Image (cartoon, grey):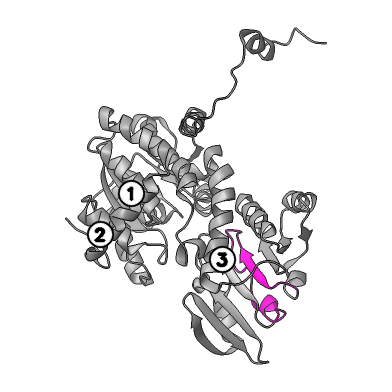
Amino acid sequence: MEYDIKDIGLSQKGKDRIEWAERWMPVLKQIRETFIKSQPLKGLKVAACLHVTTETASLMLTLKAGGADIRLCASNPLSTQDDVTAALVNEYEIPVFAIKGEDNETYYKHINAALDFGPRITMDDGADLVSTIHSSKQHLLENVIGGTEETTTGVLRLNQMAKQSVLKYPIIAINDALTKHFFDNRYGTGQSTIDGILRATNILFAGMSVVIAGYGWCGRGVAMRAEGMGANVIITEVDPLKALEAVMDGYSVMPMHEAASVGDVFITVTGNKSVLRKEHFEKMKDGAIMANAGHFNVEINISQLEQISSTMRDSREFVKEYTLANGRRLYVLADGRLINLSSAEGHPSQVMDMSFANQALSVEYLLKHGNELKPIVFKVPDAIDHEIARLKLKALNKNIDALTDEQIKYINTWEEGT
């Protein structure tokens, strides 16, 4: 079996951690039990480019239980958990190509390794598999049925491909499922981002001015958790509706050029580039800390920060200190990469349970219906979204009401008024 990982000797530790994560993923467990019986993915080749975590391992095991043949690589050079890769290879015989801290050349070598066996379905978190196939491996396109995309950044890239008519196969946007972004983006990113910053720095949030760039679902979650820890939360936005919502939620809202001089901690969650740049660095306080929770390491313009710095050094693990010409020191966490996966363990298993349930059922859906779909980006079918919510409530032992016949008739007619 082909693979490229750091240390296969870490497999027992990884197996123990995977089993712990699965304890908190009851929806995926229910889907796996169904897959074992029905084998809906038998012989299906799947290439997955995802954050290689314990939760991702549970998804891979679910797909394999359904009969899929899988190759897994990392969707971010710093998000891999090396003990998990070892367990997947050694304990579960799933080929993995991922090493925490891999350089850019190795990162793309691993993406190519995951693609070279000719997948029929791709699973992305950032659209790197799709973009690689479309740019340098177009000979694989004729065999691809469809793909899935996990995150906001990837969906944005894929929508642009579809808009320009260059996307050659259908993609299901997992991120747009209600059971994904309502929970994963808000509660998962909210908690895990703060967790990553605390593990890297051990700072106290109470009393700090925390500037959050972007008030989408991820930004909302980070703001909620930072406020809960006693921080003074400041939101920067380019969307007037989201900015207005932040105001109504009780946060200060201002442009980044104003926030730069008052913030103690800056967290970017926009999916765009150069959100923090030279003009902002020049205004920041001595000791300001910058972290990114967006998918790619482009939100903090580190090259511009290096240009105005006289010295740079690693202050502690995942913390780099930049000393400017005037003596002020600024700190960037995890080289501007996803802080929650670089210095912490990513989202809690309970929310990834729903996100990856969407992945598993969407792969099954693509296998059945992919040939009927146009090469554009689709939302997760409502039936899948609602089924996952139902399974999650069942696992939590929660019951809800059902409409009566009279109520069903009432909402489906127009004749009955006041």
Upstream in the sequence, badge 3 or badge 1? 1
In the image, residue 271 sits, relative to residue 392, either above or below, namely below
Side (left or right) of 154 relative to 304: left
Q: Which mark is residue 361?
A: none
Dividing the picture into quarters, in which one does residue 322 lie?
bottom right
Kind of element beneath mark 3: strand
Quarter of the image with the N terminus in it: bottom left
Quarter of the image with the C terminus in it: top right
Q: Nearer the viewer, residue 49 or 406?
A: 406
Number of residues whose C-alpha sits closer than 10 Å to that of mark 3, classed few (under 14), some (14–19) or many (20 or more) = many
Amino acid on which disc 2 is placed: Ser
**Is the stretch drawn in magenta largely helix, strand or loop?**
loop
Q: Residue at x 55, y 54 (%)?
A: 189
Residue at mark 3 to residue at mark 2: CA–CA distance: 30 Å
Q: Which residue is mark 1?
A: 19
Upstream in the sequence, badge 1 or badge 2? 2
Q: Position of residue 292 (x, y in %)?
A: 56, 66
Residue at mark 3 to residue at mark 1: CA–CA distance: 29 Å
Looking at the rendering, the stretch of residues picked out in magenta corresponds to: 262-285
Q: Which residue is mark 2?
A: 11
Q: Residue at x 57, y 58 (%)?
A: 271
Q: Residue at x 33, y 57 (%)?
A: 73
Q: Position of residue 33 (x, y in %)?
A: 31, 32
Tag in front: 3 or 1: 1
In the image, is residue 386 part of the stretch drawn in magenta?
A: no
Residue 375 showing in the rendered view: no
Q: Which mark is residue 292?
A: 3
Number of residues whose C-alpha sits closer than 10 Å to that of mark 2, classed few (under 14), some (14–19) or many (20 or more) = many
Side (left or right) of 362 relative to 226: left
Q: Position of residue 191 (x, y in %)?
A: 56, 55
